[in-house]
Image: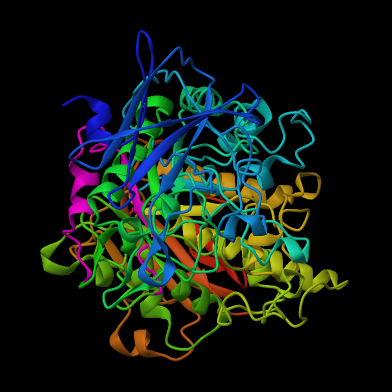
Amino acid sequence: MNRIETRMGGVALTDRGADFAVWSHHAERVELCLFDPIGRAEICRLPMTRNAESVHRLHVDGVVPGARYGYRAYGRYAPDHGYWFDPSKLLVDPYAKELDRPFVHDPKLSIFGTDTAAIVPKAIVTDDRLARLERPHFQPGGFIYELSVKAFTMRHPEVPAELRGTVAALAHPAIISHLKTIGVDAVELMPIVAWIDERHLPPLGLTNGWGYNPIALMALDPRIVPGGMTELRDTVAALHKEGIGVILDLVFNHTGESDQKGTTLSLRGLDNLSCYRHLPDNPAVLVNDTGCGNTLACDHLFVRRLIIDSLRHFVVHAGVDGFRFDLAPILGRTFHGFHSTSRTLHAILTDEVLEDRIMIAEPWDVGPGGYQLGNFPAPFLEWNDRARDDMRRYWRGDGHMAGALATALAGSSGAFGGNGIRETRSVNFIAAHDGFTLLDLVSHSHKRNGRNGENNRDGHDENYSWNNGVEGDTDSAAIRQQRLQDVSALLSTLFATRGAIMLTAGDEFGRTQHGNNNAYCQDNELTWLDWENADQDLIGHTAMLAAMRRRFSVFSRLDFFNGGGDVAWHTTDGTPMEVADWEEDEAATLAMLLDTFDTRLGREVRLAVLFNRSRTAHDFTLPTSPDRQWYSLRTDRCSAKIHVRPRSVEFFIEH
């Protein structure tokens, strides 16, 4: 069986032209529509031939790379029964790899019988080039840097104006220099495939800046990647040359066609009943396990094949190191719930192209049984919101949090250590794109999402945040300094955890969204990073922490602490923590002593990580080996009694 039949769709160039294929089980017939070189005038409609596998195919002589095309599907139009066939709707190829323009929301996309060829992007026939395949540059236990391409580069003063907001900007020397300064192991790019605005945004004068609303699952968005796959491939190669991996954040849980009032742009018009999940006894009702209006039927053969082929495409043709999956339980869902052994998850992990790539799950969705932290099959890594909340609550000052903090620092064995498993798969983070920034976390007790046009109803209400005495912006230099001290302590805590860590771009220098914790629709200076006012002290602190993680092996290791001497927990007077100490309500201080290999000294050493969340300084006494002393990694000074500043984390090495 050749590759196009296996893929169940796509375009394959031949010596004479191109072979087009698109899958639809319920369509009565499908037409290929060819357009002029600029995608405006429809040149012809050509009937396709359906085979036994419901693949509609047609070979067209004379087609060359750059040709524009789309599809029209014929059949029953009865939304109450799940049929949405409307040949007036030009449909984007689910296997499209490049589009000639971005998606723009228009009411015509939802009106039966209204032709949409003038407003729908045209797929472009591509001559795919292979990337240089290398082993992933990121390994579990490393440092992931999450970024939105546009927000990250739009205001960078050293990036040329014509590159700002594009993937190509990530290869600029100034960007690479910053990534290397703070010790990034891999960048995780928020969605760069083609997406559409939610229909409520245009009337509000807002646009989706995050991209978690895709239509074409492997076509790059022309606004972010105007140079197409060549631009992505070249940028990946440039980052690889500097030892930095690239992880793509992909959305395979829903599409921007949304609910019953949504648009008909691709999968809905080709085969709504097959591609989306519906109530078993009512095909008119789309299941909404995503909160976005629809849910992809990832257990369907065609959708599964589309997902696998999309992943293969980004590896083979761009050379990416791995993927992060938004609302990942959808990948394992059937009508009977989530299954870690689902065919789709199994297919991802066993595919010959994908089997060595990094896979990261956001382990929750909003459907029944949607919280699946710790339940994805190895080697999936998982975003760990439990550790996130526990680290936040510890520094907020919540009671009885010492044990929870220690568990997070040690790799969260409670979440990942079941059934005899001895390694963590945690991706530890304190702030991400979704929620408060790190600085806003310590500046706001309540979200401020009024600019989103939903009367502050959107976004999470419980953020485990605090404001240091004043809500939001303040002229008080003392409060601003307290907030920066808290950000510094949170960064230190994150970098002291075992397993992979993730930091969102700008949190290393004090970015703010002024309390907006759901800024997906703020594609403006609220989310664009303010490089000129970056806090250089915080950047230096982050660089020091990253260098420490690379120097001491204990943090990037994945095995859980075994209690046999590799970790010890102490009070300020140097005695081991006892049950009463762990259960103390305040428990404002904690000493974590670690046995670790020091790559700089080339031998095993002891490292002490000292936590003081109180607003007064504390002295620590640490057990000391004969003829050795404790030295601060920050000041390189030694002292028998160690002074730890208020609201801080200090690192000491014994030698």
Query: How many numbered tags mark residues here?
Result: 0
Q: Quadrant of the N terminus?
A: top left
Does the magenta segment cover residue 338?
A: yes
Q: Position of residue 545 (x, y in %)?
A: 52, 49
Query: Looking at the image, can residue 340 be seen?
Result: yes
Q: Is residue 184 above or below residue 561?
A: above
Left or right position of 624 against 117: left
> For residue 483: magenta?
no
Q: Quadrant of residue 563?
A: bottom left
Residues drawn in magenta: 337-366
Q: Residue at x 36, y 70 (%)?
A: 81
Along the horizontal axis of the image, is 52 left or right of 622? left
Residue 193, horizontal then vertical, whole percent = 52, 42
Where is 446 relative to 356, above or below? below
Q: In terms of image quadrants, where is residue 518?
A: bottom right
Residue drawn at (31%, 37%), measured in percent from left and top? 309
Q: Is residue 428 left or right of residue 358?
A: right
Which residue, as the protein is rendered here, is positioned at the far right? 475
Viewer-side residue, 356 vs 600: 356
Residue at 30% over, 53% down: 26
Location of residue 499 with respect to 55 vertically, above or below: below
Query: Residue 371's x, y, as percent?
Result: 33, 73
* Nearer the observer, 111 or 603: 111
Tell me the colour scheme of the image.
rainbow
Single out the residue that lies furthest toward the top. Answer: 15
* Residue 335, horizontal then vertical, whole percent: 23, 71
- Observer-nearest residue: 97 or 498? 97
User: Which residue is at the far left?
Assistant: 420
**Of the pair 269 and 612, the residue shown nearer to us:** 269
Q: Is residue 606 visible?
A: no
